Image (cartoon, grey):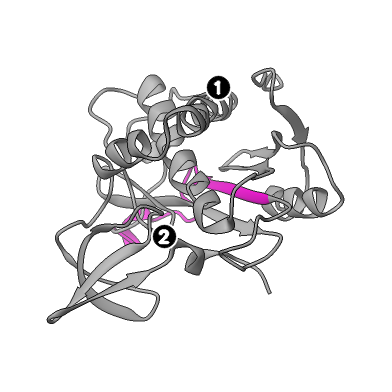
Amino acid sequence: MSDPTFPPLMSGQAVEGAMDPFDKACAMATLGCDAGTVTFNLAPNRLSAAIVFAPEVPLERAMAMLPACGIGFQNALGALAPPEVAVHLAWDGGILINGAACGRLRVAASGSDAAMVPDWLVVGLELPLWPEGDDPGIMPDKTTLYAEGCADVEPTRLLESWARHTLVWINRWDDEGVEPLHREWRGLAQGIGEEISVLGQTGTFVGVDEDFGMLLRQGKETAILPLTRVLEGP
């Protein structure tokens, strides 16, 4: 398997063994690594990677990197997979392929104050390639990439494509604002108009606000769940 090649504004850092690329990226970001660093582990049954960002806007707005990375993944897989493979995105970072859960995006930052500009923000990708057990039918609501007709998608090429497409959407967000990101994400979002349970709350998912906070209708009231609620960390 060849080493991945990244766009000029990105650089790769391979991670091996038990080290999680997401944890590695957070540790490197804390020490002051360059924005655009991509950590990755191309294991036989799993693709794991993370991208380091250096936001110049408050955390509440910088959280748009999570949906941008999700759209980047959908665009990347769409360019490599058969046309019948459908990718949707859950508000909290979940990835669905052909209607079943298949990995996730996760996010962490140097702080949790929505009004402050964070020193760094990291978005990670976890994608199962093969089932871990012998009987994938045990959990029919979960799947793997290759179980969905994508056995010809090489992990290295998918990682490269994810980085490129994500960079395209970040540049659009930077140049044109959040509206293009909103339009594209709404077309991929899972569960809008449906009753869902998320972060301990249940209601009808009616959409998102400007900063991708979830609008959750509960009876006659509509709660707003800021996207910062999905941040990982202490």
Instruction: Name which residue lies at 64% across and 49% down.
Output: 122
Please provide percent x and percent y for residue 98.
Answer: 26, 42
Mark sitting earlier along the chain (2/1): 2
Q: Taking 85 as reference, is 192 above or below it? A: below
Residue 141 coordinates in the image, percent (x, y): 29, 59
Front one among 19 and 123: 123
* Residue 157 marker: 1
SS under mark 2: loop
Q: Residues within 10 Å of mark 2 (few under 14, many from 20)?
A: many
Query: Vertical placement of 175 versus 210: above or below?
Result: above
Tag 1 secondary structure: helix
Q: Quadrant of the C terminus?
A: bottom right
Residue 222 higher or lower than 140, as above or below: below
Q: Badge 2 is on which residue?
A: 92
Q: Is residue 129 visible?
A: no
Q: Is residue 210 left or right of residue 8?
A: left
Magenta highlight range: 121-140
Q: Is residue 114 magenta?
A: no
Image quadrant holding the N terminus, namely top right
Q: Amino acid at mark 2?
A: Asp
- Residue 31 in the image: x percent, y percent? 87, 51
